[in-house]
Image (cartoon, rainbow, N blue to C red):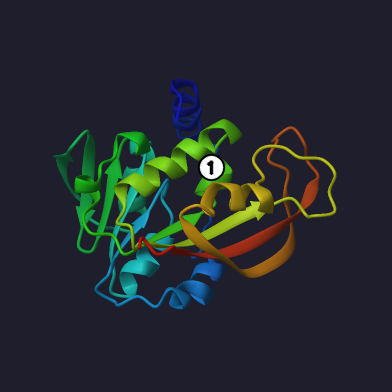
Amino acid sequence: MTGRDNELWQQSWRDRNTAFHQKTVNPHLVRFWSSLGLQASDRVFVPLCGKSLDLLWLAGQGHSVIGVELSPLAVRAFFRENRLQASRRQVGKLTLWENGRIGILCGDFFQLTAADLGDIAAVFDRASLTALPDDIRAAYLAHLVSIVPAACKVLLLTTEEPEDWETAGQPFAVADEIAGLYAANFDIQLSHVESVFEADPDPAIAESVRVEQKVYLLTPKSQA
């Protein structure tokens, strides 16, 4: 991300402005994870993971889990709040915090390399894409594709504007954008759509807005 975006994210953790953090495991992860057809021994990457409890759930399925998170406050909070003692060491340009099957690389996503991640079988992206500014999303995906194996599957959860809305704006993605970003590398299967009311992303607006939570299964296209 840009330096300005990085600083805004860091500041949100310093200010404890973390309403985006889910206090339970994401139910769509629990329901749809098996659709990827993974083995328990497969390694999973969770980009922009914050202090998500989803990391614990994935590790509980037997997976080795590696996340990446910019804010050291978020990383420290994950291990402290879950009563896990973490070791720390330098990995490339990032710091790896690790306990058992769970590791979080603390630093800039765009400084990650394939060697830092290891052999990844799947990516779990819970609204990381939709949390990014519009002009960063293509770069995010390009870098993601460059650091995971070509056969890597993706479970992508998004928060999108309902199709009957005429307005458009950050941080909601639209279906056409998903297709435009991913179709070159993945076959896209929309597995689930759920209409819900959420707090407006602008903290100055107290009203809830209707959004659609969508679950996409992304399967790599044949490289032949």
Mark 1, secondary structure of its residue: loop
Q: Is residue 15 above or below residue 223?
A: above
Tell how many labels.
Answer: 1
Q: Nearer the viewer, residue 153 or 26?
A: 153
Q: Does 222 sit left or right of 208 as displayed?
A: left
Q: Is residue 140 left or right of residue 176?
A: left
Above-or-below relation of 55 to 68: below
Three-letter amino acid code at the position of disc 1: Thr
Q: Look at the image and tell me in which quarter the C terminus lies.
A: bottom left
User: Observer-nearest residue: 34 or 74?
Assistant: 34
Please give left or right for residue 35 compared with residue 99 in the image: right
Residue 88 location in percent, x, y? 17, 44
Determine whether, in the image, residue 69 is placed left or right of residue 208.
left
Residue placed at 78% from the left, 41% from the top? 206
Query: Can residue 163 be seen from the camera position used here?
Result: yes
Do we see residue 77 in this rendering? no
Using the image as rendered, state which of residue 19 and residue 222 is in the foreground: 222
From what the image shows, is residue 224 above or below residue 7? Answer: below
Q: Residues within 10 Å of mark 1 (few under 14, many from 20)?
A: few
Tell me the residue at 57%/31% (across/down). Answer: 135
Q: Position of residue 167 (x, y in %)?
A: 82, 40
x, y percent for residue 216? 56, 64
**Whole-percent x, y for residue 26 in the image:** 52, 65
- Give the position of the N terminus as an image quadrant: top left
Question: Which is nearer the eye, 80 or 75?
Answer: 75
Residue at 50%, 68% in the rendered image = 29
Identity of the residue drawn at 55% across and 70% down: 27
Which residue matches tag 1?
A: 18
Q: Residue furthest front?
A: 224
